[in-house]
Structure formats: C-alpha cells, structure tokens
Amino acid sequence: MKFAFALSLFLAGTEGFAPAKPGTTLSTALQSSSSYENELGAIDPVGFFDPAGLTSNIDEETFRRYRAGEIKNGRVAMLAVIGYIVPEFYRFPGELMPGLAFKDIPNGIAAVNAIPSIFWMTTFFAIGMVDYLNSDNLGYHEIAPGPEMDEETMNTRRTNEVSNGRLAMLAFFELLRHDWQNTVQPGFDGFDRLITGLPFLYN
C-alpha cells in the first residue's frame, strides 16, 4: 500500500524529442481509423497511434477526458523522472519531518519504507482532493488560459507537452524497473549507482 501511495510522489523530468508539425499523421499499419487522427499528439514517425481502437466510436467529450488523463499522467511522470535523478546529486537541507532529515532518506523505491506511513497517507489524500476538486478542467488545454501567442506556436507547444509526457512515462517505468531489479538483486548490473545512464551526475 505504501508503495502505491509513493509512486505518484517521486519527483523527476526529461526533454522530449522535437515533434513534427502538430496534427501530422502517417499512413502506417499502426494508425487507427478514427475521427481524431488529426488531433494534437499525432506525430512522426508513428502518426496517430491507437492499435487498440480506444478512440473508435467515442464522442468528443470522452476523447477529451482521455486526453486530459494522458496529459496529467505525463506531467506526473515528468516530475517523477526528475525526482529519481535529482536526489542522486542534491538533497534539500533540513528535515522532512521531525527526526527524519532529507539527507537520510534513500533514493528510489527504498524511500517508501524509510518514510512513515502517515506522510504517504496525508500526501496521497491531499493529491486526491486537488484532483477531485479540479476534475472538470485539470489538464484541459482549452480551459486553462495560456500565454499570448499565435495558434501555430501554441499548437507546437501543446504537442511538445504531450510528447514529453509520453517519453517521461516510458523513462519512469524503466527507472522503476531498474531500481526494482537492483533492490531484488543488488549490483546485478555491475554498477553501484542508481542512474547508470547518466554517469556525469556523479562527477
């Protein structure tokens, strides 16, 4: 249970790849026949990727809810990747709670058992309340006001966010997999560092 509470709280981010022009699609076997093929997020080299047909025969409101969920999950994943990487070279001064200094909390999965359950429960409840109270608009581009810019620039930035979120979700699951395997079999990869792909962090 503590592990489930902690998953959404590991902070960390990444830069995504530069996308193609928003709305660009490709004629590939991976594309789905859907009325949403030209929506933001359909980029090279995959185009509109929906092999399971989740967007087939759904109304626009349902599609917008799916997209809002994707955006929110992507934002959490970007924070989660940052939270995996930053503690490897920097810790906040002070204490998370009385008697528990930030510097004494291990990084990654090991932090779940090092932090008291009351912290995870309180944080999980607070996140749930914020999400519930904002369930009608959190993540919706059309509702949240943005900076003044032309439509093409705005669409490019929106597409960047979707792309970066997708990349971050993949990155987080790989970090989680590597961390979990290292927890079960310490040193399985021959390294004594958690983030093995970024050796410059430890210089």
Image (spheres, helix red, strand yellow):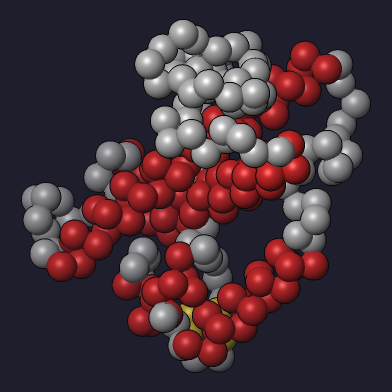
Rendered position, 153 above or below 114: above
Rendered position, 102 above or below 161: below
Q: Is residue 15 visible?
A: no
Q: Residue at x 9, y 56 (%)?
A: 188
Residue lying furthest top? 27
Q: Residue at x 47, y 41 (%)?
A: 168
Give 159 or 186, whichever is nearer the viewer: 159
Q: Residue at x 47, y 87 (%)?
A: 117
Q: Position of residue 39 (x, y in %)?
A: 66, 24
Q: Position of residue 161 (x, y in %)?
A: 63, 33
Rendered position, 121 above or below 137: below
Residue lying furthest front? 57
Rendered position, 132 above or below 69: below
Quarter of the image for the C terminus: give it.
Answer: top left
Q: How many marks?
A: 0
Left or right of residue 196: residue 3: right
Q: Position of residue 113 (x, y in %)?
A: 36, 81
Q: Residue at x 62, y 44 (%)?
A: 66
Left or right of residue 118: residue 127: right
Left or right of residue 97: residue 103: left
Give 99 or 157, whichever is nearer the viewer: 157
Give 203 or 68, whichever is nearer the viewer: 68
Left or right of residue 57: residue 177: left
Q: Quadrant of residue 141?
A: top right
